[in-house]
Amino acid sequence: MSLLQDLSWRYATKKMNGEKVAQEKVDYILEAVRLAPTSSGLQPFKVIQITDEELKAKIQPIAYGQSQIVDASHLLVFAAYDEYTKERIDAPFAQQEVERGLPKGYADDYKNQLWTSFTQRTREQHFEHAARQAYIGFGVAIAAAAEQRIDATPMEGFVNAQLDELLGLDKLGLKSVTILALGYRDQENDWLANLKKVRFNTEDFIINRN
Amino acid sequence: MSLLQDLSWRYATKKMNGEKVAQEKVDYILEAVRLAPTSSGLQPFKVIQITDEELKAKIQPIAYGQSQIVDASHLLVFAAYDEYTKERIDAPFAQQEVERGLPKGYADDYKNQLWTSFTQRTREQHFEHAARQAYIGFGVAIAAAAEQRIDATPMEGFVNAQLDELLGLDKLGLKSVTILALGYRDQENDWLANLKKVRFNTEDFIINRN
């Protein structure tokens, strides 16, 4: 199967059937997210994996009562750094030094440049930058789920601050940006399951500057 | 090949060899982006495809002289809506009505809700929301390129306003957010080509709330 076939197969599942997804398949999706690229390799986000039924029930009202929250097998909450700090910028480079056997401080100039650049931006701009990186991983997760023939609903419709509080994300310096609900479609009862996928035409979506 | 193998193969190519990528492979990547999901199906971004050598040469200084800009075969510029308008929100629903054979105005309530929600946000917040959607497509494009064994460099390092002006994006109500340079790695001369891919450990990257 190709990625194009996977993307054609998938859709934003509106009704799931409650069936559980094997953990190894979810682990595959999480590994794809971990391998996804991010700006300067900073990986400025985390994924919170939720399977607990009580916790899902608490999240449902925060997500305007959407049924996928409780009918999904797993919820993946993508949560971005609320700001970049010196420590957060240092961490991936320190790991690179060790894993690549590079001399200590090999990337100091680059790191300092990065840090200087971030000091010139607001905390809100830090978060937006981090959130965009999370969305790269989010896109990759959607592709990975489709490849595994696991249904997924990308969900932005929830009260972020309430979810952050429920999950204790503020204490971790994180802010939720999006949720991917994983499960299996309820083909009969999902109004969207049998509708044609609609996208802008290529001629309108792609602009050629050849 | 699996997506995980594709993601392990790829890396942010720092030096490309100038070889051209077959247009049908680039078209495959663009089609993957077109099929990628976006919030409420609004597809609030466009992809500008650039192959012209003179145009690439003009972009290079805007991207701090990075060599991939001119050594790449194709540049894909992801550019998000500078704001949501009533027309931009209406467009995908109008197309759905036709292609799905749904009654005219079937989504009016949902559309009005969306529009009301956007009127409560600033123009900058509109753009940030649109930019995030572009990053889903960006993530999918990176996966699609890797699947095709086409090298790709995700690039945020350029002066956005200058690129917007050069490409006339402001007149289209668009703002550039990121570039994907497509081509083939220069294995011998790319310092990053043979270094280990480094990522945070799964235990640090994934937070379990089971």
Image (tube, coloured by chain):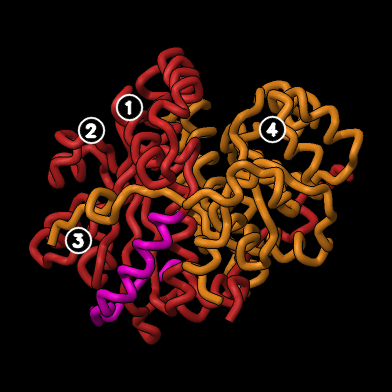
Chain colours: A orange, B red
Magenta span: B12-35
Marks 3 and 4 share the same chain: no
Marks 3 and 1 share the same chain: yes
> Distance between the Cα atoms at labels 1 and 4?
29 Å
**In-image side of B138 versus B16 (left or right):** right
Helix, strand, or loop for circle 2?
A: loop
Specify whether residue B27 is painted magenta: yes
> Distance between the Cα atoms at labels 2 and 1?
7 Å
Which residue, given by chain and number where applicable, does mark 2 sit on? Answer: B173
Q: Nearer the viewer, residue A1 or A80?
A: A1
Which residue, given by chain and number where applicable, does mark 4 sit on? Answer: A173
Asked whether disc 3 touches disc 4, contact meaning CB atoms under 8 Å apart, the reply is: no
Which residue, given by chain and number where applicable, does mark 1 sit on? Answer: B83
Specify the subunit that label 3 lies on.
B
Which residue, given by chain and number where applicable, does mark 3 sit on? Answer: B50
Q: Residues within 10 Å of mark 4 (few under 14, many from 20)?
A: some
Where is the N terminus of chain A found, in terms of image quarters?
bottom right
Q: Amino acid at mark 3?
A: Ile
Specify the subunit that label 1 lies on.
B
The residue that appears at 57% across and 46% down in the rendered structure is: A134
Q: Nearer the viewer, residue B153 or A144?
A: A144
Asked whether disc 2 touches disc 3, contact meaning CB atoms under 8 Å apart, the reply is: no
Rendered image quadrant of residue B26: bottom left
Q: Earlier in the sequence, mark 2 or mark 3?
A: 3
The residue that appears at 31% across and 24% down in the rendered structure is: B85
> Distance between the Cα atoms at labels 2 and 4?
34 Å
Where is the C terminus of chain A found, in terms of image quarters?
bottom left
Can residue A20 be seen?
A: yes
Helix, strand, or loop for circle 1?
A: loop
